[in-house]
Amino acid sequence: MVGNYSMIRHIKEYAKENNIPIMVDDGIDFLTTLVLKKKATNILEIGTAIGYSAIMMALVDPKVRVTSIERDEVRYLEALKNIKAFELEDRITLIYNDAFHVKLDDKYDLIFIDAAKAQNIKFFEMFEHNLKSGGIIVTDNLKFHGLVAQEEDTIKSKNLRGLVRKIKEYISFLKSNTKYDTEFFDIGDGISVSTKK
Ligand code: SAH
Ligand code: MG
């Protein structure tokens, strides 16, 4: 019997070897604590990668159910494998598709946006109707490895500059969105928590 701890370590090693940007340790601690504190039992995740954050959230409590969307086939298949290894198939539902093609009717306590960083506003607007009132939308990577705080002209790559600009736009969008109270946390790679009023 392989314990959860060593299976989690294995997932983290696989992510490192294959350059898969899973949540960093203090980020995942923050997220799982939030799931616990908010008693979130129905969770939607945009961006499964290999299932790490979905599994960690599901392990918070046996009542937790996660639906998670991933568009990359290799990652989706790896996530399926990992979820089976944890015997969480009945509580984690994976959707293999581009999130922009996914229409959901369910309502969730927590929506976790952790996919293409330039698309955060679109993901937010597309899935906010799936949020219960009093529910929260959590977004990862608002610091984008420190690049968001960096002077723009010191970022050499044009693509990265564009991405950083989009993340800044998303932060302004959250700050000016009066339907939500948003708090920003300098934890992990930068996390926002937007509570629906
Ligand atoms: N939440 C994961 C990490 C996700 S990494 C964890 O912490 O364990 C971001 C993932 O989002 C990538 O695997 C990428 O393929 C996926 N992604 C990006 N844009 C997407 C989209 N439009 N639809 C579905 N998945 C997307
Ligand atoms: Mg992330």
Image (cartoon, rainbow, N blue to C red):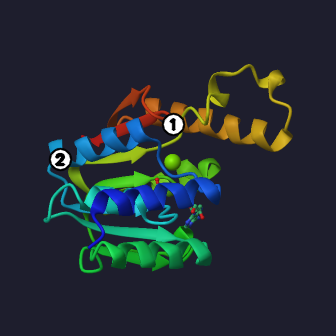
Q: Quadrant of the N terminus?
A: bottom left
User: Within 10 Å of the Cα at label 2, are there few (<14), some (14-19), or many (20+) other Cα atoms?
Assistant: some
Q: Which image quadrant is residue 168 in?
A: top right
Name the residue nearer the viewer: 100 or 62.
Answer: 62
How dense is the environment of label 1, judged by Cα within 10 Å: few (below 14), some, or many (20 and up)? few
- The residues bearing labels 1 and 2 have C-alpha atoms spaced at a distance of 27 Å
Q: Residue at x 30, y 67 (%)?
A: 66
Which residue is farthest top?
151
The residue under the point 50% across, 61% down is: 47
N-term-proximal mark, 1 vs 2: 2
Residue 133, x across and y down, in percent: 21, 51
Expressed as whole percent of the image width and height from the top left, the position of residue 179 reads: 33, 40
Which of label 1 and label 2 is nearer to you?
2
Which numbered dot is residue 36?
A: 2
Place of residue 65 in the rendered image (x, y in percent of width and height, measured from the top left): 23, 68
Q: Quadrant of the C terminus?
A: top left
User: How many numbered marks have been drawn onto this rendered protein structure?
Assistant: 2
User: Is residue 26 shown left or right of residue 168?
Assistant: left
Q: Is residue 71 visible?
A: no
Rendered residue at 55%/69% (across/down)? 100
The residue beneath circle 1 is 173
The three-letter amino acid code for the residue at tag 2 is Leu
Q: Is residue 93 above or below residue 61?
A: below
Where disc 1 sits, the SS reads helix
Above-or-below relation of 79 to 52: below
> In front here: 126 or 54?
54
